[in-house]
Amino acid sequence: MDATRPQHTTAAAAGPDEAAKKKAAAAQAAIHLPEVRLVVLGWRWPGKSLTGNTLLGREEFHLERAAEFCVKRQTEVLGREVIVVDTPGWFSAQDTPPSYKEELVRGASLSPPGPHAFLLVIPVGMFTEVDRARIEEHVSLFGENVWKHTIVVFTWAEVLRKISIERYIRREGKDLQWVLEKCKRRYFVINNCIYGEHPQVGRLMEKVERLVAEEGGHYGQEEAEKAKKAPEENQNPARDVRELGARPKQNSALSLSKAMEVDPLSTVI
């Protein structure tokens, strides 16, 4: 019996290593997906549609367009067919009408059998408890499982001249930390001033592919169906929806541009 003990101990110790090997193998298998399906989420004015244009390499999402409806565009990026769905943006200080929320959820069904990743666009700036609550309110429309398929994309990070993105995240405190913990600290910094062939787009595609490998696939259509339940109507239905097209997110990075020196940020995680 003693002779069997070393084998038992070795097998037990190899468990975590074997799991790590399987995870690494899955990541390797996911490299160069032939098709990458993305849904872009965020406020109305933080660079959400601009991020979609950066990924596509051209202006497909018109920045001045009405935000009531989802728009789907696609192109080829580094040998991959990339599908990007831009969704209606929400507002920091105003309630989102039920029709906007329904359209937001519909965005997940526009790239069957389901998006590989949701890109949650957050502008670098003062991140508040209200911002966290607005993100939770809208992302939760897709169901809790959506967080496993979410990557935070920071925009306007060029205003941080000598501050790294890691320092910025620490500085903003528990509300931003909450968002990052929900999506397993998957985040990316994008420079929307750069179009066309640029390594940042390829790096983001690789990050999406790693997410797919780690989570075992794409966001399922059944999740979208579950999340289609009518959103809570905590807003005044009599309010004129047209008023929602006027006010951008408050405390955006644009308000900080005068307080910080500008320098290109090259850190991408």
Image: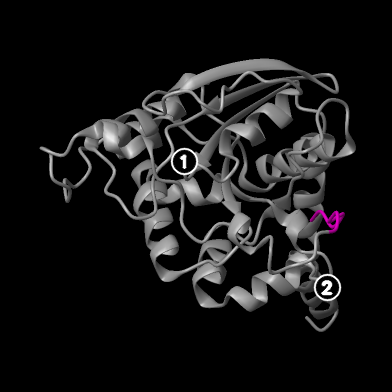
Q: Position of residue 2 (x, y in %)?
A: 82, 84
Q: Specify few, some or many for label 2: CA neighbours under 10 Å numbering under 14, 14-19, or 20 or more.
A: few
Q: Position of residue 169 (x, y in %)?
A: 66, 70
Q: Amino acid at mark 1?
A: Arg
Chain-order first, disc 1 or disc 2: 2
Q: Nearer the viewer, residue 257 or 7?
A: 257
**Does 265 lie within the magenta span?**
yes
Q: Quadrant of residue 243?
A: top left
Whole-number angstrom distance, CA of label 1 to CA of label 2: 55 Å
Q: Specify few, some or many for label 1: CA neighbours under 10 Å numbering under 14, 14-19, or 20 or more.
A: many
Marks 1, 2: nearer the viewer? 1
Q: Nearer the viewer, residue 14 or 55?
A: 55
Mark 1 lies on a secondary structure that is loop
226 left or right of 175 in image: left
187 left or right of 264 in image: left
Q: Amino acid at mark 2?
A: Thr
Q: Position of residue 71 (x, y in %)?
A: 49, 20
Q: Residue at x 78, y 43 (%)?
A: 27
100 left or right of 57 in image: left
Q: Quadrant of residue 209?
A: top right
Q: Return the mark for residue 10.
A: 2
Q: Residue furthest front?
A: 258
On the question of residue 112 being in view, the answer is no
Q: Nearer the viewer, residue 33 or 99?
A: 99
Q: Residue at x 38, y 26 (%)?
A: 106
Magenta residue span: 263-269
Q: Residue furthest bottom?
A: 2
Q: Residue at x 47, y 33 (%)?
A: 220
Q: Quadrant of the C terminus?
A: bottom right
39 left or right of 259 in image: left
Q: Is residue 156 above or below residue 209?
A: below
Pointer 1 residue: 44
